[in-house]
Image (cartoon, grey):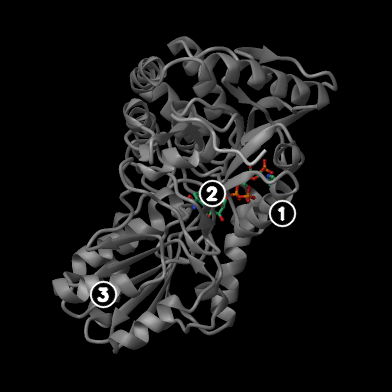
Amino acid sequence: MTTPVYENFINGHFLKNQTGDTFAVKNPATDEVIYHVEIADEFIQNAAIESAKQGFAAWSAMTPIERSRILLKAVAILRDRNDELAKVEVLDTGKPWQEAECVDVETGADVIEYFAGLAPAQVGQQQMVGNDFYYTRKEPLGICAGIGAWNYPLQIACWKSGPALAAGNAVIFKPSEETPLGAIKLAEIFIEAGVPAGVFNVVQGASEVGQWLTANPNIEKVSFTGEVGTGKKVMASAAGSLKDVTMELGGKSPLLVFDDADVSQAVSAAMLGNFYTQGEICTNCTRIYVHKNVYQQFIDELKTRTEQNIIAGDPMDPEVNLGALISKKHQELVLGYIDKGIQEGATLLTGGKALSPVSAPNGYFVEPTVFVDCKDDMTIVKEEIFGPVMSVLVFDDEDDVIQRANDTHLGLAAGVFTKDIQRAHRVIHQLQAGICWINSYGNSPAEMPVGGYKQSGIGRENGIETLDHYTQTKSIYVGMSNIESPF
Ligand code: NDP
């Protein structure tokens, strides 16, 4: 059976490359090749830049309210096609349908809608200075590059294009080569909604294509989502032409469960924050610090619910709530971390092995895995695993646990469970993380800025401030009286 071949999406349509080079994309739940994608060669790269230049000229000349109307049409199409797009995401990522059907497309559409609404409200300032005055204009940056990870491909493409396009920029987006289709679908939807050709282009390929984007002098900004190590390379390369950067990177986030917490609620948060999207979420609370007075109760309930309530299998089955990891290589990496946890003396409470569910026997599944009695210096406690692997640690002192939670170069997210309102805020204010939850975990509405402290990132996505990251301020001084000159 022949599989489809997708070309790069440039200037409003698919464009064939000249080398003929392609790569294969597999369904992680079946290990089967589902389609091929053409790699963006030099011809495509040059075409993408020319296309984005033309797209930028047309798009930035429109008023914010005209852009807003068009983007809102794209939002309506995204929502109409929810199920078709969710299926694309399930087949590309291996995540459960029951998640993609209500989260991936919806949260992407929400963000475009949010920024489409905000853009016409963005204003400059004016101020009198003596008889003269100045005013400022918020102008778009030009061509922005978006580089995405594979865990939420369509959502990431929406989160990057939403503010960029609302502010009047053009975008060249490179999805991960594991999950290239969602961004293509978004490009088609933008065209259908009336976004001019060239405003949103999709180039395909692995790190070489990403490197070309980060080094290209025609590109003003790079918004990157991926690993910390890759983020450093992207930033170094972007520095060559002094590009603006937004970095959404990895995490090793702590969740603190105090002895006055609702323990069942805390277990729910811990499971959501480790097993949702089979653990492939950057904000996951992979270090769970539980107060010694409720430690046993917490791990007893955690074990029971993990063993009874998780259903792995064909991700398209609506009953399935644990999908396949993105690739065989990633499955091996996650299993390697589990072996390391055992070697370093953590106690395996449950899970720990690869899974071969009857409905998806060839998929890259890993059992939901919980380690208890973990120590702060264990590899599984220190490094991001990006799979369904939770580490539980015990604590008995508030100041001590804050210090332990902060003892990492990462700072993406953090959470606290306690019924003491003063403690909740006191503790969360001391945690070094950009995205925090009290008696909750993982929600990320379009209105709320998200991004990391320390090496987890630079800049923010979502929320009002993000629009500023896609504009630059032009100051204009207006002379109202004769110039005083010594010449
Ligand atoms: P990677 O860093 O491996 O890749 C991210 C993207 O960068 C991919 O499109 C990749 O291409 C591309 N890339 C790789 N090398 C370069 C380079 N030198 N220059 C430019 N681009 C390059 O991340 P993963 O895809 O493995 O994603 C998982 C990581 O993403 C985790 O660390 C996770 O925490 C983080 N993440 C962070 C989020 C946040 O908002 N903070 C959200 C989601 C994930 P290709 O893969 O095609 O080779």
- Report the residue marked by disc 1: 236
Crowding near the residue tagged with mark 3, few <14, some 14–19, many ≥20 C-alpha atoms within 10 Å: many
Does residue 9 appear left or right of residue 16 in this picture? left
Give the quarter of the figure containing the C terminus: top right
Which is more foreground, mark 1 or mark 3?
Answer: 1
Going by the image, does 339 lie left or right of 87?
Answer: right
Q: Is residue 378 above or below residue 441?
A: below
Q: Is ligand 1 less than 8 Å from the beta carbon at label 2?
A: no
Q: Which residue matches tag 3?
A: 298
Where is 111 relative to 235, above or below?
above
Q: Estimate the spatial distance between the alpha carbons at disc 1 and disc 2, rounded to whole Å.
A: 30 Å
The N terminus sits in image quarter: top right
Furthest toward the right, the residue is 19
**Image-quadrant location for residue 184:** top right
Q: Name the image quarter holding residue 114.
A: top left
Give percent across and percent down for residue 326.
57, 46
Name the residue tied to disc 2.
325
Q: Secondary structure at mark 2?
A: loop
Q: Is residue 420 above or below residue 375?
A: above
* Residue type of the residue flagged with mark 3: Phe
Q: Is residue 6 visible?
A: no
Where's residue 318, x and y in %? 33, 36
Q: Secondary structure at mark 3?
A: helix
Q: Residue 352 in the image: state x and y as whole percent.
A: 50, 67
| Count of picture labels | 3
Which residue: 52% across, 60% down?
456
Packing grade of label 1 (10 A; few <14, some 14-19, many >=20) is: some
Which of the two marks, 1 or 2, is nearer to us in this view? Answer: 1
C-alpha span from label 1 to label 3 = 44 Å
Say which residue appears at 65% left-offset and 44% top-offset. 243
- Dot 1 or dot 2: first in sequence order is 1
